[in-house]
Amino acid sequence: MSTVDTQDAPLRGATVLMSGGSRGIGLACALRIARDGANIVLLAKTDEPHPRLEGTVHTAAAAIREAGGQAVAVVGDVRSDDDIEHAVETAVADFGGIDIVINNASAIDLSRSLALEPGRYDLMQDINTRGTFMLTRAAMPHLLLSEHRRVVSMSPPINLNPRWLGAHMGYTMAKYGMTLATLGIGAEFAEQGVVASTLWPRTTIDTAAVRNVLGGEKLATLSRTPEIYADATYEVLTSWPVSVAGRSLIVEDVLEAAGVSDFSKYAAVPGTPDFELYPDIFLD
């Protein structure tokens, strides 16, 4: 069992198991947590540089160490049960346990149903829904030995508005499955003190997915930086459990509850007013 020292930094000594994290939102969250002196195990596929994707799991681990944390890069795929087990075993062997699971890895394809290739459908289901469930499930015996016992998934509230159900059904099912897996595990293990939440932003975030899939450079300029997600994740992980347990949380709401009223520093293009930022999907 790992030990969490809450005397000066709430997450000092905590061990975080994260899927993905080589770049974007996952890396930003890891760097924010690392400032407390946490231990972070990244399970990610990017072993070598990719022409369209910045960074690898190794450069991410190096950045985490520079930010003040400890890091181990586990090259693997959240679709693989063997890779998941290896990541869990690594966290326990290197740091003595697991206190937090962050389900960050995700695949996106916004194709309409008739255009969505079966392989892409399977990819989204395997990474988003199955990966979230299996990673959290594998970590659970160790989470139950921790005093922290937190699970956070980067997925939206389940919104049954036909606007979202019919827009990109394959992706919607995969992301909602991620949320169901998280909240379901939180409900099942609530009596054992597991605190599970999901987190989603009101505006798009400047990530590789936004640049390469959603809207290119133009949409990126109308987005917020990953740091807003990171700061909200940190608040969720350090909040009183009753305030976040079993809830689908919104990034901006979390930060407002923490006393943040000015979000201008999070604009991808400094000075962009909030009303010009592009709203994210799944929120009415």
Image (cartoon, grey):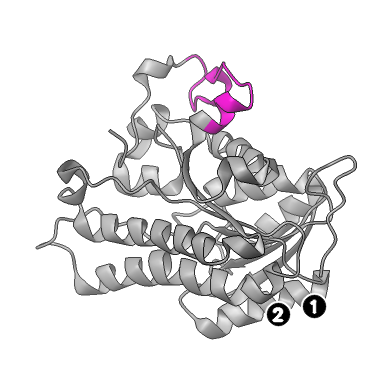
Q: Answer whether labels 2 and 1 touch (C-beta < 8 Å).
A: yes
Q: Residue 223 at what x, y percent from top left?
A: 42, 30
Query: Is 12 on the left-hand or right-hand side of 17?
Result: right
Q: CA distance from mark 2 to mark 1?
A: 6 Å
* Residue name at image x 62 percent, y 60 percent: 194
* Residue name at image x 19 percent, y 69 percent: 117
Q: Considering the image in quadrants, where does the C terminus appear?
A: top left
Q: Residue 189 at what x, y percent from top left?
A: 57, 66
Instruction: Give the magenta-colored segment's residue range.
Output: 254-271
- Label 2 is placed on what type of residue? Glu
Can residue 264 be seen in the rendering of this structure?
Answer: yes
Query: Is 254 on the left-hand or right-hand side of 203?
Result: right
Query: Which residue is labeled 1 in the image?
Result: 93
Q: Residue 96 at what x, y percent from top left?
A: 82, 72
**Does dot 2 land on a helix, a strand or a loop?**
helix
Query: Which residue is labeled 2 in the image?
Result: 89
Q: Quadrant of residue 48?
A: bottom right
**Residue reaching furthest front?**
191
Q: Quadrant of residue 17?
A: bottom right
- Say which of 158 and 51 sits in front: 158
- Label 1 is placed on what type of residue? Ala
- Say which of 58 and 98 sits in front: 98
